[in-house]
Amino acid sequence: MKNLKGKVAFITGGGSGVALGQAKVFAEEAGMKVVIADIRQQALDDAMDYFSGKGVQVHPILLDLTDREAYARAADEAERIFGPVDLLCNTAGVSQFGPIADATFDDWDWQMDVNVKGVINGCMTFIPRMIKRGEGGHILITASMSAFVALPTTAIYCTTKYAVRGLAESLRVEMPEHDIGVSLLCPGAVNTNIHRAVETRPEKYAKTGYYGADEEVFGHLKAVIKDGFDPVDLGRVVRDAVEANQFWVLPYPEFVEGQHQRDQEVVDAMLMYQDHPDSIRRAKMREEMGQNMPGQ
């Protein structure tokens, strides 16, 4: 998708934060038609106030992305307003942290439903439409550096982000035959209001072992991310990745040393078994199979 002008983007969580940064870049700088979907009407209203008078094509849709029927209706509405969706940005996400021993099933269900099932719903809603249309497209999945780094109190969030990383890597090897590109964005700190995500937590997930709308907790969480990427600057990184069909979008080189250490630990664990009898047996089988291949 080297030429984005005039194409259609559907961005979840588009009323604020990382997703709104993407919407601003794709609408204002890339000239795309942009649908912003969000569970918060006020966030959509505020975003549309921002876009008002800017001469861009942006359409808001109120959407609970855990509702599959509502997601299908949102896709129909996007197509009716702007035409077929070329770029799906699975960006909406929530977070809440605390010791795993204190977690409730509602704590698990809320983050799993939004961060994992919401992404699944987006992919399963739009990918078949893109394939049927036959003109390619692009899927962006926003995970987190928590898809690589496990820290205390992040078990639920980390689980969700590892999961969507796996989905993205699977799509990466499956979508090229349909000319559909895939990008995986893994933000570290971004200066947003994600620390207030619990304010959007539906009543059906009410039982929690963690914090609620606690300004003191919010202050501590905000301190961790306030010096991070500006959402618009991160949106520009995403735009460049989409245009280049770049899979890994990891603009956080400060994580390199830790990643090297984790990668080496995995490699070392594999090599521990290189002299195991079954490893030797499997290696011999692979060698024999190679020798028996046509042309060998």
Image (cartoon, grey):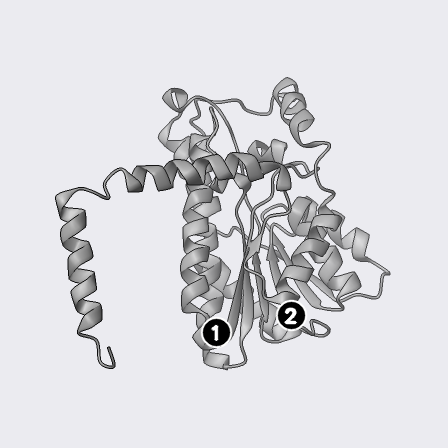
263 shown above or below 79: above
180 and 127: which one is in front? Answer: 180
Amino acid under disc 1: Arg
Query: Mark 2 falls on what kind of element?
Result: strand
Which of the image's four quarters has the N terminus? bottom right
Residue to which mark 1 is pinned = 129
Q: Residue at x 49, y 67 (%)?
A: 126
Q: Is 271 positioned to the left or the right of 281 in the image?
A: right
Residue 98 in percent (x, y) is at 47, 23
Counting other residues with Cα less than 10 Å from the Cα at mark 1, is it few (<14), some (14-19), or many (20 or more)?
some
Q: Is residue 163 left or right of residue 89?
A: left
Residue 106, quarter of picture:
top left
Locate residue 147, reporting x and y percent. 48, 42
> How many numbered discs, if any?
2
Task: Note whether 232 is above or below 227 in the view shown.
Answer: below
Instruction: Give the amino acid type for the residue marked by disc 2 in the picture.
Output: Val
How much space separates mark 2 and mark 1, taking CA atoms?
13 Å
Is 82 displayed left or right of 212 in the figure? right
The residue that mark 2 highlights is 8
